[in-house]
Amino acid sequence: MSRVILPAIMLALLSSPAIAGPLGAPQYDPNAPQPVAAPRQNMGGGFIEFLFGDGPAPQRAYPPRQGYEVNPGLNPRGSVFASPGPAPEAEPQRAMNPIYLPQTVSYDGHEPPGTIVIDTPRRFLFLVEGDGKAMRYGIGVGKPGFAWAGVKTITRKAEWPDWVPPPEMLERRPDLPRHMAGGPENPLGARAMYLGSTLYRIHGSNEPWTIGTAVSSGCIRMRNEDVIDLYGRVKVGTKVVVI
C-alpha cells in the first residue's frame, strides 16, 4: 500500500504551478492564483498569537482586583504597591479655634517680665514680655474637679519626656500603661515643664484639637509646636501664676 501512495504524492508535488528557480527554490508567479488565508483562529491570545500571528501581541485589559487600592508613591523608585483591603478613609481633621494660636497681646497685669500667667477660665497662657506686652498661647486645662490655682515655679524641664501615670490616675484608669517612653504618641508631647513638687506640668499634646477645652487631669497642655516655643523662652526657676 505504501509503495502506491508515495509515487502519487511525488506526482502531485511535481505538478505544482510554482516555477522552479535556481537550486529548485519556488519563484513567485503573478498569474498563479494566490491562496487566501483562512480566518484567524483564537489560539489563546498573548504570546502564542504573537509568535504565529501577523502583529504584536494584543494588550489585555485586566480589570482591577476587587478590594485592592493602588497606592502610588510608596516606593522611592516610582513603583506602586497594592495594599489589601479597601483604602481607609482619612480621619477628619478636628479644627482648633484660631483664637488659640500664639500671638502677641497687650498685658496690663502686675507680674514682671519672664513670668508665666495661666488664665484657666479663658484657656490662655501668657508669657509676660514687658513694655505692656505678653506672648499668648492657647491651652487645655483641668476638667471639672481637676482645675486648680496657685503660684509655682518650674523645677525641671524635659524634652520628649517619658510618662508614668500617677497612682491616682491608675486607680481611675487601671487599663493605662505603667510607663510610656517619650515620642509622638506620648500624651506629654514634645516638651514638659514640671511645676514645683506637684504632679502638674505644662506639656505638649498629641491631641491638639483639645486646646481650648477643659480635658486634662490638672496639667496644662499645649500644642507641640507651642510648647517647644515656650520651652525655649523660659528656664528653671520661672514663676508660674495659675488663676
Image (tube, rainbow, N blue to C red):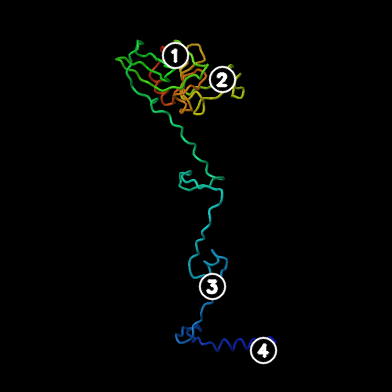
Residue type for callout 3: Arg
Residue furthest left in the image: 131
Find numbered disc 2 in the image and state the secondary structure of the residue it sits on.
loop
Q: Which residue is mark 4?
A: 4
**Residue with the most extreme right position:** 1
Circles 3 and 4: CB atoms closer than 8 Å: no
Labels 2 and 3: the sequence-earlier one? 3
The residue depicted at 62 percent of the width and 88 percent of the height is 8
The residues bearing labels 2 and 3 have C-alpha atoms spaced at a distance of 77 Å
Horizontally, residue 135 falls left or right of residue 171, namely left
Can you tell which mark lies on residue 40? 3
Crowd class of label 1 (few under 14; some 14 to 19; many from 20; radius 10 Å): many
User: Depth check: 211 or 231 in front?
Assistant: 211
Vertically, is 161 above or below 71? above
The residue labelled by disc 1 is 154
Question: Between marks 4 and 1, how big is the CA–CA gap?
Answer: 117 Å
Cα separation, mark 1 vs mark 2, equals 20 Å
Q: Of the residues tagged 3 and 4, which is closer to the observer?
A: 3
Instruction: Give the crowd class for mark 4: few <14, some 14-19, many >=20 residues within 10 Å.
Output: few
Position above or below: 15 against 50: below
What's the amino acid at mark 4?
Answer: Val
Question: In the image, what residue type sits under mark 2?
Answer: Pro
**Residue ID for mark 2:** 165
Splitting the image into 4 quarters, where does residue 167 fall?
top right
Estimate the spatial distance between the alpha carbons at disc 3 and disc 4, rounded to whole Å: 36 Å
Disc 2 crowd rating (10 Å Cα; few below 14, some 14-19, many 20+) is some
Quadrant placement of the C terminus? top left
| Residue 49 position in % (x across, y down) | 53, 67
